[in-house]
């Protein structure tokens, strides 16, 4: 599948989005919450778990093993789901997944569908065909509910409204909930949450079908696992007559023990919690004697380009557990937020995954939107080499001739010089001397030829002293003496 609602926009749209994001004072204020919240809390949670790095190695081994035998575990999972009274449906792409879900909803006579948090449903643009069929769709995660009111996409994979201030959300609630008293208080988070909870409770009780994603799928038991802090996942999966789980194929793990290993890393990496408030295991429809649960249980397993990744240099990306740690620690995401990426999956993980989903021709700017500081790989609980894969996409992009002619000519000139050490060292010394003199006593440069756009938002420290090559050569001469 290529495309789908919310997938990557073109290069010009990305650059326009970046410019708008940097100039948006409210967005810049809201983005400070990423550094003050997620980053600090993750570090504290990791420090309290001495075996974090050991768990990381174990989790990587679990996912690598599963991906190496993915067909076998998918078959085992399907058998267990069938044994519990459920049904598994395979969707090669987004169009097939949308069609399967729409067919199931029509068979259930659905008029109202509630949804728990599911990035995959965003990936395939599920809401549009359901609404076109006159089915009301209500997002029940508070963040997703807010962006649905605004007609936006989530800007973060675990915190959909990280781009908004409390004042903006209050304005949205007053606009959307006009039947409620105008004098009610909405100036604090507790009042906003209480209002959303009251309105959503009506939807939970009236829903015909509940749709959730899955953080993990367990082959041993045929269970799906979701983690939430609001309980909306439980209400979505147990109250309606039909529960539909939609998840991508790499969410499979072999056993319950494997699932718990990954869960110990997930919340700590995502929100800095030891475990989320709700960790819910769903296994099939309601059985005789059960107090609640759906009468029908369906799982839609989405490929959408994942199987192609198994055999290429991006296979490590399939270990991703969607914790958002790479977004939280990325200086680029921290400066522009998620919407500028033009994709459901922003930040470093999106820079790798989105080109696989829509093609590098439509997402070439995303792997280029990186400082390559390596922080994303450092904090990833699944040890995914994100910078290496962004470089691989850059190489593919260059091989296809996508970069502008000016960019390709500059790279060829650099390559020409780099292959000739004498010329390269002479040029490096000349440029370093030029930059040092231009900076003068200030010691920093605010403008350079060919780098006008890059230096619009930053200064560059001027070179000091000799070049690295000269210092290295002097050190080698010293050793020989």
Image: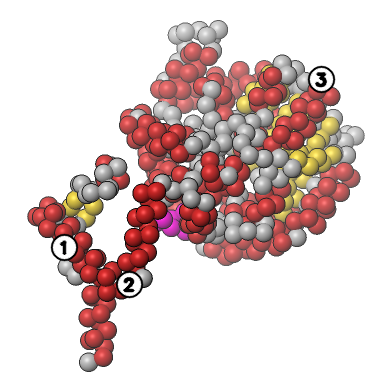
The residues tagged by marks 2 and 3 sit, at their Cα atoms, a distance apart of 72 Å
Left or right of residue 301: residue 422? left
Give whichever of 298, 339 is nearer the camera. Answer: 339
From what the image shows, is residue 436 above or below residue 451? below
Q: Is residue 309 above or below residue 271?
A: below
Q: Residues within 10 Å of mark 2 (few under 14, many from 20)?
A: few
Q: Quadrant of residue 20?
A: top left
Whole-angstrom CA distance, mark 1 to mark 3, is 74 Å
Image mark for residue 433: 1
Is residue 264 visible in this depiction of the protein?
Answer: no
Image coords of residue 215 (percent x, y): 66, 45
Name the N-terminal-most of marks 1 and 3: 3
The residue nearer to you, when weighing 155 against 9, is 9
| Quarter that holds the N terminus | top right
Q: Which residue is mark 2?
A: 420
Q: Magenta residues: mostly which secondary structure?
A: helix
In front: label 2 or label 1: 2
Residue 109's label in the rendered image is: 3
Residue toward you, 390 or 253: 390
Split into 4 quadrants, where in the image is the C terminus?
bottom left
Element assignment for label 1: helix
Q: Which stretch is magenta?
A: 372-379
Q: Quadrant for residue 462, please give it.
A: bottom left
In the image, taking residue 107 as reference, residue 13 lies left or right, namely left
Q: Which residue shows up at 59% across the image and 64% down it?
A: 57
């Amino acid at each position: 599948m290529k495309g789908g609602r919310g997938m990557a926009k073109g290069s010009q749209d990305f650059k326009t989005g970046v410019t708008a994001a940097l100039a948006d004072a409210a967005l810049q204020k809201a983005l400070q919450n990423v550094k003050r919240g997620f980053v600090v809390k993750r570090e504290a949670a990791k420090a309290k778990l001495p075996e974090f790095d050991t768990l990381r190695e174990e989790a990587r081994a679990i996912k690598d093993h599963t991906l190496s035998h993915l067909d076998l575990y998918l078959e085992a999972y399907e058998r267990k789901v069938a044994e519990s009274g459920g049904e598994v449906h395979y969707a090669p792409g987004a169009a097939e997944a949308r069609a399967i879900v729409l067919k199931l909803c029509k068979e259930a006579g659905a008029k109202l569908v509630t949804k728990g948090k599911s990035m995959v449903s965003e990936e395939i643009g599920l809401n549009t065909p359901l609404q076109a069929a006159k089915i009301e769709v209500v997002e029940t995660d508070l963040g997703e509910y807010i962006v649905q009111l605004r007609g936006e996409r989530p800007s973060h994979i675990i915190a959909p409204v990280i781009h908004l201030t409390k004042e903006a959300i209050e304005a949205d609630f007053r606009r959307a909930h006009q039947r409620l008293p105008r004098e009610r208080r909405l100036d604090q988070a507790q009042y906003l949450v209480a209002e959303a909870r009251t309105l959503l409770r009506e939807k939970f009780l009236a829903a015909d079908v509940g749709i959730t994603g899955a953080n993990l799928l367990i082959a041993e038991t045929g269970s799906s696992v979701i983690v939430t802090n609001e309980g909306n996942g439980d209400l979505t999966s147990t109250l309606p007559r039909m529960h539909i789980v939609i998840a991508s194929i790499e969410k499979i793990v072999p056993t319950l023990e494997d699932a718990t290993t990954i869960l110990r890393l997930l919340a700590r990496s995502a929100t800095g919690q030891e475990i989320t408030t709700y960790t819910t295991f769903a296994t099939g429809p309601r059985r005789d004697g059960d107090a609640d649960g759906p009468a029908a249980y369906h799982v839609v397993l989405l490929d959408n380009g994942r199987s192609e990744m198994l055999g290429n240099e991006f296979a490590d990306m399939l270990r991703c557990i969607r914790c958002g740690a790479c977004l939280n620690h990325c200086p680029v995401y921290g400066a522009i937020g998620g919407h500028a990426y033009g994709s459901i999956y922003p930040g470093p993980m999106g820079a790798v995954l989105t080109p696989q989903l829509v093609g590098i021709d439509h997402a070439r700017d995303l792997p280029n939107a990186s400082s390559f500081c390596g922080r994303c790989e450092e904090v990833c609980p699944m040890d995914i080499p994100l910078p290496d894969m962004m470089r691989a996409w850059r190489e593919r992009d260059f091989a296809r001739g996508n970069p502008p002619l000016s960019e390709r000519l500059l790279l060829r000139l650099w390559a020409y010089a780099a292959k000739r050490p004498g010329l390269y060292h002479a040029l490096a010394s000349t440029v370093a001397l030029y930059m040092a003199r231009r900076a003068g006593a200030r010691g920093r440069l605010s403008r350079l030829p060919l780098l006008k756009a890059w230096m619009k938002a930053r200064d560059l420290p001027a070179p000091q002293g000799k070049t690295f090559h000269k210092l290295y050569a002097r050190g080698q001469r010293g050793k020989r003496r």
